[in-house]
Image: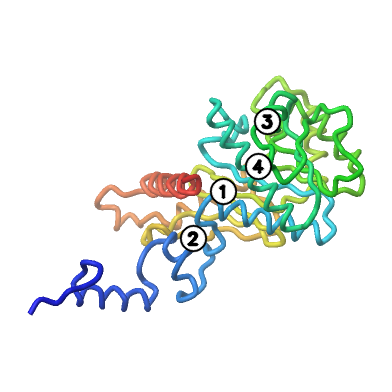
Amino acid sequence: MEVRTTVGVRPKVAKDRRRRERKGVLGNKRWIGKVGKARCAPRDDDVLPDSLEGAIQQAVEAVGTAVRAGGGRATAEILLPELWDPISGALMADEGDQQKFWEITRYFAELLVRELNVRARVLYPDMGCAAMLKNAWPDAGFEIGCLADRKPVQDTDEIVLIAAPDPQGLEDAKRITNLAEDVPVVLFNPRLVSGDVGIGLNVRRMRANFLKTFVVAYSLRPIGAGSVFRKYPGNWQVFVEETDLPGRYRQVYDSPLRPQGERLDAILEEAMEDEAPSDDQQGGGTSVWNNLGKTMASMQRFMRSLSQ
């Protein structure tokens, strides 16, 4: 007699699948992160988000925690590879990219308003952008302005969010932060780092001194071979993929200090060397460079998956 199943899976296969699910061994990080995390032993990479929406929610939680702890100035950065370049900042090559970027700021701002139960003002880089978004978002849960407004901060504002400030907006960002006084200021996806070699030393110092007054509440930043991550009040962490467990990531750095420049390069180089096989194991031509390429491709897939 034929045995019927409701999902077109043979009974034994379905039973085996349920057994594997109970053991927590089914699927990659996206599965474990969304479904089976409670059934599995905790892992360091459980802190990584499973989607762009999840990353934004994490950023809101981190900024909320920082503000409640008395942090009057906080930064949140979610740096998607298709919208961001490690040297020149956000790309936003066409109108579609720009709109996606602004939609991300809206989602972040509205979640933050609910998280802190405050009246917020979001300041965009220029008057044209602010006017366009006011027209596009008549029901936005916050006030919209621009960095060049004559009075960018109003008496009724309880938090000010500066969206994607660039090097040209540095002076205005400083002015607004000073005007805000006791009102918390949040930089969301700042683009103050520039690859322009014409920027003088004084400007670089001014930018560095300004950013030092902000606590980095949240950072999810793709790098060549992995990702740098921080969620306040936790430490800075660096992850690279587990070569023998696709979809999961190995923590190779955990410290209160942000890994940058040569220090970050050294962390990644050491991680790749740890993954490299010995000379006796390299019969198939596998080397640290092969592992590096695989890890880069995997992390790029992970970061791209956040934007889907």
Query: Disc 1 to disc 3, how far (Cα)?
Result: 48 Å
Q: Nearer the viewer, mark 3 or mark 4?
A: 3
* Residue on which disc 3 sits: 135
* Residue on which disc 4 sits: 105
Residue type, mark 2 in image: Arg
Residue type, mark 4 in image: Thr
Query: Disc 2 to disc 4, how far (Cα)?
Result: 30 Å
Residue at the (38%, 49%) spot, across then down: 291
Closer to the N terminus: mark 2 or mark 4?
4
Where's residue 252, x and y in %? 54, 58
Query: Disc 3 to disc 2, how far (Cα)?
Result: 45 Å
* Residue on which disc 1 sits: 266
Residue type, mark 1 in image: Ala
Residue at the left extreme of this rendering: 1
* Residue on which disc 2 sits: 250
Is the Cβ of the residue at disc 1 closer than 8 Å to that at disc 3?
no
| Vertical arrangement, residue 195 with respect to residue 19, above or below | above
Residue type, mark 3 in image: Asn
| Residue 39, quarter of the rendered image | bottom left
Secondary structure under the numbered disc 3 in the rendered image: helix
Query: Disc 4 to disc 1, how far (Cα)?
Result: 33 Å
